[in-house]
Image (cartoon, rainbow, N blue to C red):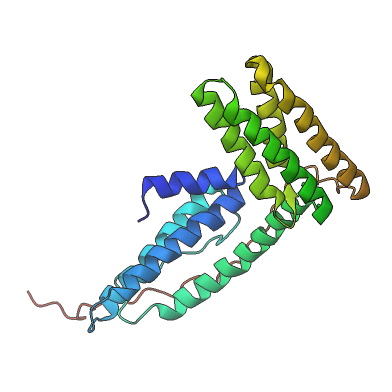
Amino acid sequence: MISDDDLLQAMRESRGDKQLAFVKLERRFRETFKKNMASLPEEYGNVLLNSLYIEYMNHTVAAVKALRVPLFEGWELPSHEINQSVSSVHQDFTAAVDNYSLQVRLAAAEQVLMYSIHLTDEDKRKIHHFGARIRDQIQKSAVREVKRDQLLRLLNNFLREVDSDYTKMEVVGAFITGATHIARQSLEDLDPIRGWIETIADIFGTAQEEQPLSLPPAQTKQIPGPNLPKQPARTPRAELDDDIPF
């Protein structure tokens, strides 16, 4: 089982997208499964091996149900009482998960590109130039330390994003609105950064005009997941004799 912190982090990273949350959670479940497999003793039987397979599948199916993801409709977990290894069931299971996860990741990547802008090298050079002037002004200002740290954090996150092949507009927006708001409420010695921020915004505006952004769909499309065949009848470890002695 992954920790509560890992669960919360996966939900934060998905930003309300339940399908993407499932992908991130399943990735953590599988990492835990692989670590547990690597720590198995040299000699182990089907009982111990199956317990790890079933634990991973159980957690994954629980995430499916909790997040209402359209995956594994009508599918049942194998029983711990099955004599033979359930490795083949696990292989079919992970293949279905991988199929679904790749579709979700591609859809998420498409959404990122819709809200991203490709900057030229010259645009990046100009933005870093004004970014350096903004940093200098922040560092020599008399603004409170907590506000200074907040501004520098916004600026650093923004400049890192600028160096990406595609700059996400949510990071740009967070910097422009956050830094402008703090500068407006702070001392006069932060006034110069407002002009430089406006210049940076103009650079992005020009880049956006030259590279129109596609409009996103009205609603996030639900990706149907592949269904696994129903599990065969369970085979108990031992069956009672037909004749029961009294």
State the residue at coordinates (58%, 47%).
Answer: 14
State the residue at coordinates (50%, 51%).
Answer: 65
The vertical placement of 170 against 243, above or below, is above
Residue 123 appears at what percent x and percent y? 82, 49
Residue 15 appears at what percent x and percent y? 60, 42
Residue 124 in view here: yes
State the residue at coordinates (65%, 58%).
Answer: 104
Q: Is residue 116 left or right of residue 141?
A: right
The vertical placement of 153 against 3, above or below, is above
State the residue at coordinates (79%, 45%).
Answer: 126
Which residue is at the front of the view, 152 or 65?
A: 152
Residue sitting farthest toward the right: 210
Image quarter of the N terminus: bottom left
Which residue is at the front of the view, 21 or 149?
A: 149
Residue 179 appears at what percent x and percent y? 67, 28
The vertical placement of 49 against 209, above or below, is below
Which residue is at the front of the view, 102 or 145?
A: 145
Specify the quadrant of the image occupied by residue 56.
bottom left
Q: In this view, does 176 lie to the left or right of 204?
A: left
